Structures are given as C-alpha cells and as structure tokens.
Amino acid sequence: MTKAIELIVSLDPEVMQIAGRSLALAASSCAIATLIAIPLGSVIHFNSFRGKRLLVNIIQTLYSVPTVVVGLFVFVFISRAGPLGNLGLLFTPAAIIIGQVLLVLPIMMGLTISALRGVDVTLTDTAISLGANRFQTAALVIKEARFAMLGAVIMGFGRAISEVGLSLMVGGNIRGFTRTLTTAISLETSKGELELSIALGIILLFIALVVSIVLNRLQQR
Amino acid sequence: MTKAIELIVSLDPEVMQIAGRSLALAASSCAIATLIAIPLGSVIHFNSFRGKRLLVNIIQTLYSVPTVVVGLFVFVFISRAGPLGNLGLLFTPAAIIIGQVLLVLPIMMGLTISALRGVDVTLTDTAISLGANRFQTAALVIKEARFAMLGAVIMGFGRAISEVGLSLMVGGNIRGFTRTLTTAISLETSKGELELSIALGIILLFIALVVSIVLNRLQQR
Amino acid sequence: MSNNKPIIETTDLGQRLNGRDVLRDINLRIEQGEVFALIGPTGSGKTTLLRLLDLIDKPSQGKVYFNGTDVTESDRQRLDTRRRMAFVLQKPVVFNASVYDNIAYGLKWRGVSRENVHTRVDDILDMIGMVDFHKRNARMLSGGEMQRVAIARAIATEPEVLLLDEPTANLDPVSTAKIEELITDIIQQYRTTIVMATHDMSQGQRLADRVGMLLNGEIVQTGGWHEALNSPRNREMAKFVGIENIINGVVVSSEDNVVTIGTDDSVIEAVSDCAVGEQIHACIRSEEVILALSRLSSSARNTFTGDITRLTFTGPVARVEIDCGFRLVALVTRRSVEEMPLEKGKKVYASFKATAVHVIRRG
Amino acid sequence: MSNNKPIIETTDLGQRLNGRDVLRDINLRIEQGEVFALIGPTGSGKTTLLRLLDLIDKPSQGKVYFNGTDVTESDRQRLDTRRRMAFVLQKPVVFNASVYDNIAYGLKWRGVSRENVHTRVDDILDMIGMVDFHKRNARMLSGGEMQRVAIARAIATEPEVLLLDEPTANLDPVSTAKIEELITDIIQQYRTTIVMATHDMSQGQRLADRVGMLLNGEIVQTGGWHEALNSPRNREMAKFVGIENIINGVVVSSEDNVVTIGTDDSVIEAVSDCAVGEQIHACIRSEEVILALSRLSSSARNTFTGDITRLTFTGPVARVEIDCGFRLVALVTRRSVEEMPLEKGKKVYASFKATAVHVIRRG
Amino acid sequence: EGAEEATGAPLKAQERLQVATTTSLYDTGLWGYLEPMFEEEYNVELDVLYAGTGKALEWGQRGDVDVITVHSKSRELQFVADGYGVERVPFAYNYFLIVGPEDDPAGIKGLTPEAAFQKLMEDGSASFVSRGDDSGTHSKEKAIWAAAGYDYEDVRNAGTWYVEAGIGMGPTLTMAHELEAYTLTDMGTYLAFKSDLELVPIVDEGGILLNVYSVIAISPESVSSTNIDMANNLIDFLTSEEIQELIGDYGVEEYGMHLFTPCAGNEPG
Ligand SMILES: Nc1ncnc2c1ncn2[C@@H]1O[C@H](COP(=O)(O)OP(=O)(O)OP(=O)(O)O)[C@@H](O)[C@H]1O
Ligand SMILES: Nc1ncnc2c1ncn2[C@@H]1O[C@H](COP(=O)(O)OP(=O)(O)OP(=O)(O)O)[C@@H](O)[C@H]1O
Ligand SMILES: [Mg+2]
Ligand SMILES: [Mg+2]
C-alpha cells in the first residue's frame, strides 16, 4: 500500500507511462469492441433465425476462452511465418489491441443480447409502431437498457485492462513499448517483487474505478 | 485441430484428468460464487442506502482486477507466513477455488444487479402486493430475469475456467494435483508447443460449450 | 386524383401464435376516411388483428393491402407503410425519457427537422393539456397521463390511418371526452382513417361509422351500429352487445313472417322467417320493454305480468328485473320509476312489440 | 368479538415523490365490510393512495392504521398486514409463468399447503372461466385475459381488504359484468372490505356504498353517491361527476333560500343559501332537463327556449344539445325523441326545477 | 541496400532489433542494464523479449526475433544444426545450484549433484520441486538425473516427494520454500529471491552444474526478413571486451558477488 502510494505520489514517469499505455490500449480495444458488439448483438437479438439459440450458446461459450488461447490464435496469424506476417504487427501495441478486441467481443455481444432481452417487448413494438426502422428501434431499446449496457462496456474494459496472457504473448512486454500494467505485474511477480506488483495492481484498480465512475456519470445524463 | 481431435479421441488419461479437474474447480467456484453473489446482489438492488451508487461503482471496478493480483492477495493470506498459513492450503485445489471465487464474485454480483435492474418495477410491486416477503420477491424477480442471470452464471464460469495467473500462483500447476487446462496451456506455450496448447484450448472451449448448453436447457425449463 | 381503392384491405388473413389459430379468414375493407370499430369479447383477437394491420407482426396466412398495394412481405414497404399509420397500443408503454421526447420520437424517426418537431410537439402538448408536463419523465406519470402521452405520440405524426386499441380504457370520463373530441377533430380536419378496438360500446357508437364484430378469431359480422346492436348473429354476440333478454324457445307457428315462439311456459310473438320447429333464441333489448301498472292496450303484441325482483339505478335510467316465469329486464327512466312509482315486489305489466324481438337460430 | 375500530384509517397521510406533493392530508376511515370508491381525474393521486393503503410505499407523512394498529413503520407489521390484503394494480403485469402458477404465487408465499393451493386455484380458475387456460403462459394472454388473471390472483388469497385500481378498465362489457358479479359475491360471502379506484361512475354506483373524491392529491369530498353526483364541491368535481350544464352567474336576489342567478343574458332560479352578489356556478344534471315542444305549465321554475344543435344516441338515451343563449344539454329517452319527434334545428322548450340546480361558489 | 544504409535515409523509421532472452537472464536485470548502451551505440531500438528456452527457440524458428540468448546447449546445437541459427556464441556462464531448507533433511550437503539426486531418489521422503517446463534449468535437471543413472520417467512417477510444477524459476523457488523442499536453480534468480526465502545453497559444486549463456543470430537463409547485420552487431557487442567486463562485474553491487563469468565466444570448462 505505502509503496503504491509512493509510486503514485512520486509520479514515477515510467510507471505513469505504463499506466497510460494500459488505459489507452484497453480503452481503444473496448471502444472498438463496443462499436462492433452493439450492432452485432442487436442484429442477433432483433432477428429470429434458425440456429439463433446455438449462436447465443457459442457466444456464451467464448466467455471461457483463455487469454493465452486468443493470444496463440492472434500469434499464429501475425507471426512472421503467419498469413499476416509481413505487416510486422507482432510485438506491437496494435497486436495487443487486436487480441483484446477478439477477447472482449463475445463478452460484450453476449451482455448486449442479455441487456436487450431484458427490455419489455411492448417497448420494441411501440417503437416500431411509431415508425422506427430497425436501427432506430435498436438505438431506443439500447437506451432503455442503458444500465445493463453500461455494465457490458465496463465488463469489456475490465476484461481488456486486466488480461495478461494475451499481452505477453503478442505484445511481448517490451519495456517502453508494449509493457502494460498487467505484464509489468506479472514480470515483477516472477522477479519476486511482490510489493511492487501489488502497488501496480492498486494503480490499475484506481484507473478502473475512475473509468467506472466516469462512464456511470455519462450514462446518467 | 487434428491434434485436439486426436487428444480427445485417444482420451489421453492425463489430459482427461486435467480437463476434469478444470471443470470441477471452475464449477465449484462458480457455484459458490453464485450462492454468495445472488443474495448479496439482491440485497444491494432491493435496498436503497447512502453510498449505493459508489458501491456499485466499486463492484464494477473489480471487474478489472487482474488474476495475478487476486492470486497475490490469496497467496499472502495462505502462505506459510500468512495468517491462514497453518491450514496448508497453498498449492492445493482449495486455494484455486478460493481465488476463483474472489475473482468471480464481483462479476456475478454486478451482473446480478444489472439483471435485476432490467426487471420492470411493477413486477416487484405486484409480488409485494401479493404478500411476498423480501426473499420471495427477490426469488421471483430473479426468475423473471432468468436469461440475464444465466448469462451471469455462464460469465462467472467462463472467467473461472479461463483464468490462469491465479491458478499458477496459488495452485502451482503441479502435475497430477493442481494442473488445469489453462495452466497446462500456459506451460505448453512456454515450451513452444503451440499445437498442443491450441488442442488443450479447444478441449476447454468444448467443455464450456457443453456447460453453456446444459445451463441454457436448465434455464428453459 | 381519384382513389377508389380501400385504404386497407385484407384477404384471408390468419395468424397462428404458439400453435394456436388466433385469427382466421379475416377479409376486411376499410375505406379512406372511414372510422371503423372492432368489437368482441376478451381474447377474440382484436389486438392481434390491429398488430397485423399496423404491420408489426407478419400474418401466418393471407395478405394486407394498403391503397391497393400488397404490403405483406417487403420489409421496406412495411416500414414505409407503417410510417403512414400510427398505433396506440392497448397497454401504453412510455419510453424512459421526458414527455417531450416521448412525443418527439416518431417525428425524429421520420427525419422531421428539429424546429418542426419543436412546434409540432408543443402544439400537441397544448392539445392534450400537458404543457406543464413536458420535462417530466414519462415513467413517473399516472396511468391516465401515460395514456394521453401515448395518444399524443401517435397523432403527432399526422398519420393517414390511426389504429387505436382501447384508447380510453385508463381514462376518467372527462379525459375520455377530451380524447374523443380530439379524435373527432382529427377525423374532421385530416379525414384520418381510424380503426379502433373498443369495449365501450357507446364510445364506438359516438365515433365509428361501421363496426366489425370478432368472435374467436373470426369476423362474424360487419355493418352499421344499428344492425350490430339489434341483429346480432349469435347468442354470444347478442350478450356482448348488451341484449339482456335472451330467451330460449321453439317456433310453434309461422304466418306471414310472424312467428309464435313457445318458451318454457309462455308464448312470444316475433317477426322472423324461421320455420316451425326451429330452435331459436328470442332477443329483446331491455330498453324495448315497456312497463305499466295496468294492462296497456297498445300495439305491443307481447305482454307479461310479474313481480319486480330488483331495481337499480345508473344515472338517469333504472334497470328493472321482473320475474314473469322467465327473467325479463326492462330499462326505464328514473323519472317513470318515481312517477308510477315502481318498487321491489310490485306487480307490473311488461310488454314489447313483435318487431322488437330479434330471433337467432340456435346452432 | 366486537370491533368498532375502522379496518383502515389514515391520519394526515401525505406523499412526496420526486419533489412533488402528490398526496396531502388524507384522513380516511374505511369501516369493516364497507365498499369504498375512490374517484377523481387522471393524476389526482388514486393510485398513489392505494399504494399507501396496501403498504407498498411508505408515506412521507402521516400514518396508516389497520384495525386500530399503527402499521406505518415496522417492516414485519407491514408484511403481515399486507398479507391480509390484496391489491389489483392498475396495469396488471403477469409473471412469466403459467396462468396456474400466477394465481398460485400469493398462496404459496403465505405457506399454504400444496393441495390447498391446488384446490383453491382450480376453484378460482373455474370462477373466472379460465379453466382451459391454466397451462398457458400468462405473458401470451390478451389484455382482458391478463386482467382477469390479475383479479383472480388477488382474490385467491381471500383477503380481508381488497384494493382495486381500475379493475375492469381492460375488460369488455360481458367480462366486466362477470367481474362485478364476482366482486359482489365476495362482498356478500366474505364481507370483504373493498377500496376501489374507478373511472366508471356507474360501476362505482353499482358496487360502492360510499365514495371519496380526490382532486390534486386532496380528498375534497366523501359521502354517499347521491351527494357526490348531485352536490359536488367545486367546478372540477362537477364536471368530473358528469354534470354537463355548468353555467357561470351572479346571485342577483335571494329570498327564503330561493335565489335568482343572473347569467350572461338569462336568469335562473335555484335553491341555495348564497348571498346576493356572490359569484357562483349553477350546475344542472342533463337528465333533470325536460324537453317539450310547447311551453309546459309545470312546477319547473326555469324554462328556456332554443334550437337543437346536436342530437346523439347512446343505447336507450338521447343527448340533446340546445342553444338557448347558453348551451344546455338534456338527456331524454330515445323513445321520447322518436315520439315528439325531436331533430336538429327544431325549436324546443327546456325546463328544470329550481331544486335541480346545484349552486357552487366560485373561488 | 548497402548504400541506403550508409546514407542513413532520414525518413526511415527507427530501426528495431528483436532479441529473445531466457527469463532467468532477463530477471537478473542484465538486459535492462545493457539495452541503453547498445541502443546508443548502434542507434537502434532494441526490443528485449523474455521467455522460456523452448519459446525463444520457437520465435527464432518462426522469424519473430532476430537473435536469441538461451542456456540449453544440446537444444542450441540442434537449432543451429537445423539451419535456423547461424552460430552458437557463448558469452557468459555461471553455475546452477541445488538449494534447500537449512537443516538439509535429506542430508545431501557436500555431495556431488549426481550423488545428491541419488540420495533424494532412494530416500523418497524429502521433497524436490522441479520446474517441469522444459526450460534450460529443467533440461539441466534432467541431465543430472541421467548422469545419476535414472530414467527421467521413473523419477517423475517416483512419488509425491517429486513435485513437478510447471512454472517459472521464481515461483518454483517460492514453492520450494513453502513446501520446505529442494530445487535446482540458476544463480541469478536465486539471488533475487534469496531475501524472501528460507532456502540455502546445499550443493553448488560439480561440473555438471555449469550454465552457459550463448547468443545465436537467426540465419537469413531460414528467415529472409531477419535483421542479420544488427544481430551480428549485438553479438559483437556482447563479446566485446568492454561489455564482457561489465557482465563480469554485474550484480556485485546488489548481491555482493559475481553473477556471471564472461567467456567471450569460447565454450568454458
Ligand atoms: N414517482 C413519481 N414521481 C413524480 N410524480 C409522480 C410519481 N408517481 C406519480 N406521480 C404523479 O403523481 C400524480 C398522481 O399519480 P397517480 O398515479 O396516483 O394518479 P391517479 O389518480 O392514479 O391517475 P390515473 O387515473 O391516471 O391512474 C400524477 O400527476 C403523477 O404524474
Ligand atoms: N403470443 C401468443 N401466443 C399464444 N396465444 C396468444 C398469443 N397472443 C395472443 N394469444 C391469444 O390469442 C387470443 C387473442 O388475443 P388478442 O390479444 O388479440 O385478444 P383481444 O381481442 O385483443 O382481447 P382483449 O380485449 O382482452 O384485449 C387470446 O386468447 C390470447 O390468449
Ligand atoms: Mg386486446
Ligand atoms: Mg392510477
């Protein structure tokens, strides 16, 4: 605790840089995933088709995908020997974002679907009867489910900022370039620097708390 | 893929044992967390008190807690020098369960609150007017929000079965005792055995799929 | 531009929900500018039909035409057509937003400019007397206030067709009168076509030109109100339109369309083309039954005598139940009750004309 | 055991919601076995009051007594008391479960044994005519069917006090009659105390012994129906109870409680204790206005002449609007219209007694 | 190409070199110490990636890194023989050591590593924690078992005293501490964790404990995109006299002893 407070108070530039990077990466991933998950989740919710139930099952199954597996998957694609090898994405922040988006996407889609299902169907009917097209209906219903949607976004952000296996695998924890709070924590832990690890963990949670408060404020407007 | 199928078809006893252990641990953690999160989440949802909003913020913040940090936290308590050191929990499956419960609890509580908030208040009023006590009201409302509640349980299970940092730290990845699918994956990956890792990942997802389907079936009854 | 196509037409419309045939063979023609009332008992399919007309649900069978165009299938057409209509659902839900925004939604969705939305919503708020409410969250309104918002929201879009499902079920008499006035204004100003489901028969009569009666998912009768109220097709509809006297009997003689009907222990004369021996129901509206303290010499062919068993008042009218072998209900003015005077247990003569008897064959 | 305490009593009850005083100073006494109707315009606070009586919400002020015990605060007592009551909410929501389970919930929650639940639910299903529905998911019912389930669910628990908020708003006339019959049966069989909010004045009269009128969150009047309908306390209530003729005027002379009221261009005689110079509203129920084609010589002190501007029929009665300087509405029977006969544009004499005029002071 | 390099095209993005190093080396902080020097000298952005030996070799094989530094001689030789690496260049060494509880429950103090392992195996009561992750350290452990005359499969299944974890060196040491067990560790990690542990060196002498770190550039014939020139620069850098001296002195300040012995391109021993 004291170490964390020291670190925060002293504004150690390296720690601040790592924290900023963690926040930026997770926020970007979460934003991208939100932009994909909400439309996709809505499309699934608002349409009935064969295999919908199975699709939802599969999405929920992907809640369980370990970060390392996502990491492996992305790695196989972007490593030199992989199909996208010549883009030189491996061991860059971009690789981490790609991985985090993939990791977070099913979670946010699943939670979007849950949130939409929670909204009274009469509300959807009312919107349709008032001439809303699919997009407008979805926008309204999402607005009505705003608390749950916010929960989905925070969950997505939380998953992205807290994951480590993926960042290690495709980011490589390169000092000054792809090191994030979680990879730093894992490194410090493996070096036996437990206090420092806990200090970094507290910084991470502090960021998450601020993000949660800010998003809640935004939602209430 | 072929390797995974080979592994599954050949029913390699060691792999099957690891898979079974992963399932058992995650299912236990998720069950325990459910039993705690649903009542606690309901209590928070159904009561209004000062600081409720902040409490929800904090719960949502804990979505972001990295597994390593939970691992460290548990480690400090159950290591030989820690307050619970003489229970000899470190590097046992019990330690993993304790850690997973702590990890999953805020997620399930937060999603429970989201789910309950999604239910029309008139429904709660109706239950109360028909003479339901707090507990009965909560039970009914939870039943009405069953899809979202199921999502919460699956999310909890998914988080538990997919985490690795925690299991490594307090379980120790001991062969034949605390090795789970994710710790095995991480081990194989560190050895550079990517195919085997992916094969194990597929087995894990297969388990998750079965769990998701089974839980969905249960919910529909 | 002449337009002799009905604005809405349905052919063999049917709807199957969860394995139950909820609607069957609905063939309706609603003309431009017409006000059409849908009546029928609970669960007869009124809401289901309105949902099909508003193109919210797709029918499991049959087609819906709008101005002669088949709009049953194409999603694009369904949306465009729906935007020319408005539907006030039976249980209005309001959006979790201000009253103003609730009313503005339909306009915004149609791409109406911000200023136009503003003027239009202000007008409507004024019309429904809710100007002071515009900033309030609609979720916190009372039942009747919500209903008014729901109606306002629908008419804000100036629809060509207005579909109303029990529009005043949650409203007090004064608000009901206001809404009815609003609807009348709309009808006169915009020649809006209206299809409304209503349980309030008098409201239906006040507003609608034509009525369609639904029973168990089928339209059993369409036509004017007089026909609907006085010549229902079957016993259920008769009860439904408020015919209180429905007496089982058999035709015992028939001459020049005047039949004599034998009931348990009396005889009723009626005008009907039923043949001797047919099992029938004789229906007499209670307001057609005249009461007197002595035998009247009038043209009324049916006169019975009995004791008053019950007397209840509703506003200016009194409902008198008489036991004359069978139970007969008469509706008279409060004033006649006071003048005669009538009271429980008193013996009265009840009479009604043969032409006041509507005969329904028993199936 | 004698019990002279009112079953429900409230003292200075007030409710503040989101910064608005929705109810103020409600002092009510409901006696055991009484049927009490709450009437009032939309938004007047009926639902809010019923929620307080059912102990769903806590009042921001005042107390609720049940059988003489203060049950406002203690959660335990609130639950126990609530279990002796039942409340049918204005917009019934059904649980996402079968019709059977919906009705069984209240019983299960009270710990009734499984067999007893079974018999009781079956009885109720039979009573409301929904035996065939018991396995159906209640969410898929029609509006009226849901309403019936909601009522069934409430009475299944055999409450001592039944609170009803617009219990038949979504029901057709036949179902309404059935539900009213059910309620009447319950009143007679169990001497259940009933408090109901209703917009349907005639329903109120059919069922309730006493009526309380709410206006802007305050009870303006309690008493019998006759008083409520004929002597409302202010203009708004007068309109609300369906007095169609409300004429502004000033008392120009007064003698032995008979006053002469000057309106814009006429003079009305009435019985009132108002003093000369007081600003008043003269209220005349439309059924008190008698129409004739020639000047009647009767005891009616007020006679006006004018042309019929509108003629509408509702069932057995006709509503006649006459322009005699001011607008006067008369309610007569359909038969008199046909016999006289009356038609639009025709000149008629309208008269009403001085005792038929109810005078309200203008505030 | 050469001309372009000479003119140092100003628009060219900062050149990067990716080096994969074994975790034990990284955790000592040696790389953090050398990295800025190399970057300054060659005007290059050095990305230091750490991983187990197996993974580092896999990266090299796939071309994801340009150069690797590892410590598992037989696998390195195989790697070069397979054509993935240009040449194995040893640049420093130290010794593994067997650590354990101070009271030495199995009584192996003073024995050779091979004899110590034999005693552990026969005794079967004192716990031994194995890395179990095919790392360089684990390879060494297996080599000792082999030298002691055992089939490794037999050791694995010998009993609960043989704890086969699958974790890094640090966690393994922690586990040995918690379980009051012996383990085989590299010097750097042990020194880093020493203060938190009640483990002392039990066996630290014997030729088999030799731990050689070598650097291998990835062969451009195997991976065409590899930055072989800069990789060679790194090898030159590591084996330069100046840096060799720095490596030799590294850690004296912090741990009060030498962590590595420089060996500038020659196989020690
Ligand atoms: N939660 C709330 N916050 C603010 N105002 C409220 C809230 N609930 C109700 N109101 C307001 O209180 C007033 C009384 O509401 P209530 O629902 O009791 O009316 P009501 O008499 O039942 O009306 P109706 O006949 O339309 O059902 C209304 O004006 C309503 O807008
Ligand atoms: N989704 C559904 N699945 C199965 N049955 C349904 C469904 N929706 C409606 N029904 C049934 O279809 C019948 C017609 O329902 P509908 O809502 O159209 O009746 P309604 O005429 O509007 O009745 P009300 O006057 O009570 O509103 C009812 O018996 C109802 O239970
Ligand atoms: Mg309906
Ligand atoms: Mg209300």
Image (cartoon, coloured by chain):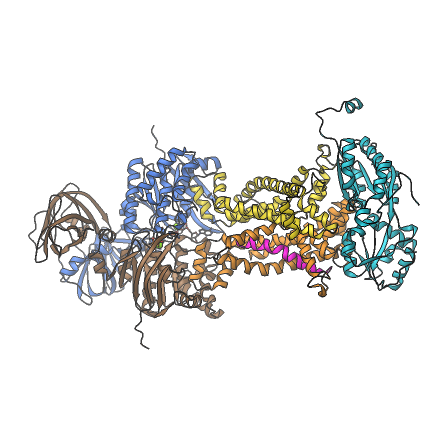
Chain colours: A yellow, B orange, C blue, D brown, E cyan
Q: Is residue B99 magenta?
A: yes
Residue range of the region highlighted in magenta in the rendering = B90-113
Question: Is residue C343 in view from this perspective?
Answer: yes
* Quarter location, residue E115: bottom right
Question: Is residue D169 in view from this perspective?
Answer: no
Q: Is residue C318 left or right of residue A52?
A: left
Q: Is residue C159 above or below residue E112?
A: above
Q: Is residue A190 magenta?
A: no
Point out the image quarter for the C terminus of chain E: top right
Q: Is residue A83 left or right of residue D133?
A: right
- Number of residue marks: 0
Q: Position of residue D89 (x, y in %)?
A: 39, 57
For image coordinates 37% across by 36% down, the residue present is C118
Q: Is residue C110 above or below residue E261?
A: above
Q: Position of residue C132 (x, y in %)?
A: 33, 44
For image coordinates 16% across by 57% down, the residue present is C335
Q: Position of residue C349 (x, y in %)?
A: 17, 62
Please identify the residue farthest to the bottom as the structure is shown: D1
